[in-house]
Image (tube, coloured by chain):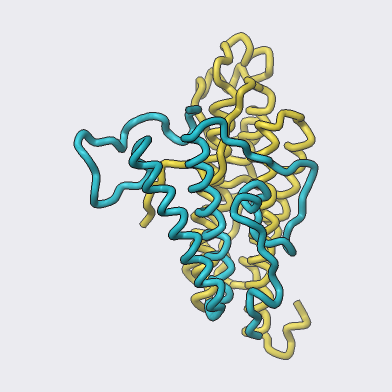
Chain colours: A cyan, B yellow
Amino acid sequence: MNTNMNDILKLVSPKEALNRGNLFENYFWPYKYVANLKPSNEREDLMQKIQQFGFAAHELNLYLDLHPDDKQAVGLYNQYSETANKYLNEYEQKYGCIELDSNEKYPWMWINSPWPWEKL
Amino acid sequence: MWKYEKKLQFPVNIKKKNIQMAKYIITQNGGPNGELAATLRYLNQRYTMPDDKGKAVLSDIATEEMAHMEIISAMVYQLLDGATPEELKAAGLGSQYTEHGYGIYPQDSNGVPFTAAYFAVTSDPLADIAEDMAAEQKARAVYENLMNLTDDEDILAPLSFLRQREVIHYERFKELYEYYAKMLLGDKSYLI
């Protein structure tokens, strides 16, 4: 059966998806508490935008693994990935390296704190 | 191969030390229903999936589980931040401190170390994916138990996120299971 995303799935915004841990309204099954992330500074705000759009793209990735013919979902995946990359580039210019690519500066920034488990 | 991204999938910013919750939450790193078992289960099962959909779903979910193990470890690390050996001892973590100091070690909430015996690989896609569905439900149940043990929103937020991921992964595995049941059993797929 070739079901289109539109026919069966209602999506929430990337921001709400990260708070919920779920992009898909019809699969959402809350328990006790839903996050309401509020960034306390610009750095956190930018990181959360990367997390929001990266997460929404990842959700579509998992969906597309089982529905590779859903053209609309591929388009949305590309759109969210591009937005995540835009925020990622902005973050890296301002605060430091998240992913190694072919445009690294001297001195080597990759080792700089904070590492992901450390508080800002 | 894999490429590391120097960020968490979901933010962890725990302001209040909580040694007891650290002791409980570590089970979702190295316990029977934890994220390490999940990632190794899917990574090792994926090679014999009958078609590309199964290989893709297992590879991608396994990769996400590594990011979940990192979230759990970040939580434990921050929950123990500033704890003295005396406080650890009082919270029942004296033995833990003796063996591991402030390090993160894959174990359950009783200190039992991780073992590959927590998961199975049969190379039968229906048997393997049925286990994966059960694993997601068990992990969801453990996250609910953990959420019942705290009111701290800094702890609840990532736990709630991780619990919801179990819900979505279960749905993906269920979809895959039904697809393979139809593919492998045809008219008899109603049997399973």
| Residue B139 appears in the figure | no
Q: Nearer the viewer, residue A12 or B91?
A: A12
What is the x, y in percent for residue B122?
Answer: 58, 66
What is the x, y in percent for residue A2?
Answer: 63, 84
**Where A81 sits versus A37, above or below?**
below
Extreme residue in the left direction: A106
Identify the residue at image location x=70%, y=32%: B153
**Where B163 sits versus B79, above or below?**
below
Extreme residue in the bottom direction: B187
Identify the residue at image location x=67%, y=83%: B182
Based on the displayed image, in which of its 4 quarters is residue A7 positioned?
Answer: bottom right
Extreme residue in the top direction: B86
**Where B22 sits versus B106, above or below?**
above
Query: Left or right of B151: which side holds A73?
Result: left
| Residue A64 appears in the figure | yes
What is the x, y in percent for residue B161?
Answer: 65, 46
Q: How many marks?
A: 0
What is the x, y in percent for residue A61?
Answer: 52, 65
The quadrant the C terminus of chain B occupies is bottom right
